[in-house]
Image (tube, rainbow, N blue to C red):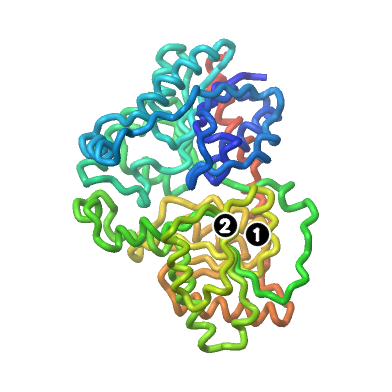
Amino acid sequence: MTKILFIAYYFPPIGGAGVQRSLKFAQHLPSEGFLPVVITGPTPADAQWTPHDSTLATIVPGDVQIHRAKGPLPAVSTKLRGRLQRWLGWPSPFSEWWQQSAVEIACANADGCAAIVASMSPFESAAVATEVSRRTGLPWVADLRDPWALDEMQVYPSRLHRRMEMAKMEKLLSSASLIVMNTPAAEAALRAAFPSLGGKRVVTITNGYDREDFQRPVRGRTDDKFRIVHTGYLHTALGRQLNGRGLSAFLGGAERGVNILTRSHVVLLDALEQWCERDPAALRHIEIVFAGKTSREDEAAANRSKLCAAIDFRGYLSHSASVDLVRTADLLFLPMHNLPAGRRARIVPGKTYEYMASGQPILAAVPEGDARDFLTQSGTAFVCRPDDVSGMVAIIGRIYSAWKEQVNLCKPNVTFIEGFERRRLARALADELRNLLAPKAA
């Protein structure tokens, strides 16, 4: 076994989409000959972005060491001070605490390790890995779960702040021996934005799914409902804020032409209302299930809908329960932010891969980009643009008619979907680590 330092702030018992990639690498890398030594944060309070899922901790192999920074997390004294820190570019208390704590823990446990892998976000982990690499001489790998300052969903106080973050990103990644992006579009954007990184090894390893999650028995349904399911976060609050021309949008901190509100249930509810007006008898069959942490804005949008009685907010579910819900859906809803025509999105929501693996029909309201390409090739998706209400109405009507006739319109491209299985992705990372360490071994 080759030991590697694995810096992953988000790690079980925290749940949610941000944990899955690091957890699955930690689970599957040992079978490829690499034993992670995990450097992570303390277990924070159960909150919107850090839900607890104790079931995930049982997945971590017993020989994987986990070293946690000591809590509690530092707090900003006031909201005003927090805003000032962000506007003035000062390091936040969290940034300073995490960098200091993680560097100390990593260096104390680096003996016998051959490399460093840093999972980001938080992007402060790049500074952690850079410093640990400097002190130990170990090469480090930047694993970007999101494309950092190149993420069109990221909102900064102003255009200047975005440029400052771009400069920081370029500087820190320049010290990495390998850069891993999680979509082809993100890799292409990185190469285009930072020609100075042209000599670096940059690869794409996507997110994925676990085969076992879709092989275990799942309890069948006996109701007569046409179940529409969405898992994960809705972004109603941020979408409404930016569509209302907030200060960040006015000053160029948000990328122009990006509509984040469509990455919520707002357009879906409009489409369902129109569809039910055309087919009122369908209303008694509809069940709309949202699984995941929600905000007041998410719930308020649902309460204003004529379909509010059919909506079921189930809160955060364990990962296994969430997958089972996906498998019992009659239609899966996958919304994304909208972009101007001809512009490709750089991200693919993590739920995409599990949706495809389920074999269930997907209403994919997505812009051009890798997500649309993957979903189209999967044979399980029915695609429209994120703001296309009439397109959604047509898709819902088609899937509903097939449901009544007990016909599955999906034709899963199994070979294509299996390419996103987590063991294959872990093998791809292991191969990159072997290539990175081969000259040193020789």
Q: Is residue 271 left or right of residue 76?
A: right
Amino acid at dot 2 = Thr
As drawn, the residue found furthest toward the front would be: 77
Q: Disc 2 or 1, which lies upstream in sequence?
A: 2
Closer-to-camera residue (79/198): 79
Q: Tell whether label 1 touches label 2 (CB within 8 Å).
A: yes
Q: Which residue is mark 1?
A: 326
Residue 280 sits above or below residue 157 on the image: below
- What residue is rendered at 48% in x and 26% in y? 71
Seen at 44% across and 71% down, the residue is: 267
* Residue situated in front as seen by the camera: 212 or 249: 249
- How far apart are the alpha carbons under marks 2 and 1? 8 Å
- The extreme right residue here reads 217
Q: Which mark is residue 359?
A: none
* Whole-percent x, y for residue 360 in the image: 66, 65
**Residue 439 location, x and y as percent?**
53, 17
The residue beneath circle 2 is 231
Q: Secondary structure at mark 2?
A: strand
Residue 265 place in picture, x, y as percent: 47, 66
Amino acid type indicated by mark 1: Val
237 relative to 409 in the view: left or right: left
Quadrant of residue 423 in the image?
top right
* Structural crowding at the residue carrying mark 2, measured as other residues with C-alpha within 10 Å and reported as few (<14), some (14–19) or many (≥20): many
For image coordinates 31% across by 58% down, the residue present is 241
Q: 320 above or below 197?
A: below
Residue 258 can be seen in this image: yes
Instruction: Say how many tags the image has.
Output: 2
Quadrant of the snapshot with the N terminus? top right
107 in relation to 342, above or below: above
Q: Residue at x 55, y 76 (%)?
A: 395
Left/right of residue 108 with respect to residue 58 in the rendered view: left
Q: Residues within 10 Å of mark 1 (few under 14, many from 20)?
A: many
